Amino acid sequence: MILRAYKYRAYPTKEQEVLLAKHFGCSRWVYNYALDKKIKTYQTAKESLSRFTIQKDLPELKKAEETKWLKEVNSQSLQASLENLDKAFTKFFRDKKGFPKFKSKHDNRQSFSVPQNGIVDFETSTISLPKFKNPIKCKLHRRFEGNSKTVTISKTPTGKYFVSVLVEVNEDTPKLKPIDENKAVGIDLGIKTFAVLSNGEEVQNPKHLRSALKRLKKQQRRVSKKVKGSNNRKKAVKKLAILHEKVSNKRNDFLHKVTAKLVLEHDTLCLETLKVSNMIKNHKLAQALSDISIGRFNEILEYKAKWNGVNILRIGRFQPSSKMCSCGEINKELKLSDRVWTCKACGVTHERDKLAANNIKEFAFINIKNTAGIVGFQACGDEGLPLSEKQEAQPIANGVGG
């Protein structure tokens, strides 16, 4: 079984918009209530509350005079908020960063989920949800076959509504293709050029944010001059949000096209493990790095690779992909500003990015072993040093639904 997400534009009526706003607010309130209770319980009793324990409070909260408005929304959505909080804590303890934060009604994105009973009707182009008397009209531009699981409704800062349907597709995950060096490509990601491939191809950086920066700054100044709370400020904020949305849409479109091309044309993709959170600490490069969205690129690439049986091999982020000449000499004096350098040992001149792409592919294949038709590779640590022979692993292509 494969999980896929299908996203559609929704067009609710004025009456439905009011009920959607209630769902957004109640789901947010329950999330904040649970987070506050978990924090206080741990501080006083050193106990960790599960979502099932907090879930028992919901019936009493609906009866209480000050919170009886919780009865107006779908109970599944309230329970889904508790589940989302549990996932946030799991991610915090697993990755050791990003402690769950309280949600605000002023957040850029408002959303709630319906784990069950969300019915998609392609004949009438509508989606039916509990507590809604009439179905919500949607632009169902893509059909799907499978069981719809969770329906998530979201509202963007520009006032648009979207419905995301998580579908369980009755398909088996494709087997990974055999690893063949002739059908593999090394990929070096960068700022000046978005990606340089070991076969000589280059993907230019469109720089969507940089091209829109002048208009964004101008609109931001207009927002800052408006009186807080006024209608004119709300209009200016919406115009600013529209500009940001255009940049985001262009970036996502570019990333989807690039990743689709890479997955369809190659059986094995070799990349470098990058610590994006550390890279953006450099304030001179932070904006440019955020614009190319390396994290989002890897996320999309991995799930598309999984769906197509494409291998992804990664090397350690401390391996000298840009510094090592083809003769084996390592240039320890190489700076980030040096885009072209000459090897002192053999005198060969290298273009930094092309050399890195070739070295990434070479490093990825160093520990590849083909024994009796079973293909595997030796995992590398962060320093790029091979682990022991006993720690072999299959090529990773882990993806996410959506």
Image: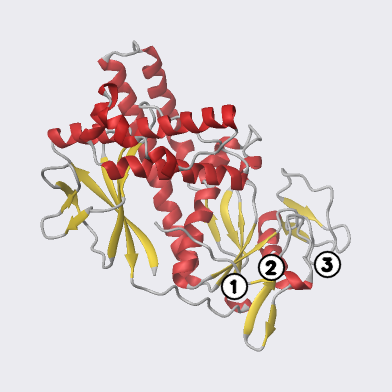
Q: Identify whether 272 is placed above or below 58.
A: below
User: Which residue position holds label 1?
Assistant: 184
Mark 2 and mark 3 lie on one chain; the one further toward the N terminus is 3
Q: Is residue 149 visible?
A: yes
How far apart are the two marked residues, 1 and 3, measured between alpha carbons? 22 Å
The residue sitting at 32% across, 61% down in the picture is 167
Quadrant that contains the N terminus: bottom left
Query: Could you tell me residue 82's position as x and y percent?
Result: 40, 41
Dot 2, crowdedness within 10 Å: few (<14), some or many (≥20)? Answer: many
Using the image, tell me which numbered label, if any, was put on residue 327: 3
Amino acid at pointer 1: Ala
Query: Could you tell me residue 194's position as x and y percent?
Result: 55, 51
Viewed as shown, does residue 351 lie left or right of 93? Answer: right
Corner quadrant of residue 149? bottom left
Query: Could you tell me residue 304's position as x and y percent?
Result: 45, 64
Using the image, tell me which numbered label, if any, was put on residue 358: none
Viewed as shown, does residue 263 lie left or right of 253? Answer: right
- Which residue is nearer to you in this view: 65 or 322? 65
Which is in the foreground here, disc 1 or disc 2?
2
What sort of colour scheme is used for the picture? Answer: secondary structure
- Which residue is nearer to you in this view: 318 or 255? 318
Mark 1 and mark 3 lie on one chain; the one further toward the N terminus is 1
Mark 1 and mark 2 lie on one chain; the one further toward the N terminus is 1
Marks 1 and 2 in Cβ contact (< 8 Å) = yes
Instruction: Classify mark 2: helix, strand or loop.
Output: helix
User: Which residue position holds label 2?
Assistant: 364
Viewed as shown, does residue 256 lie left or right of 356? Answer: left
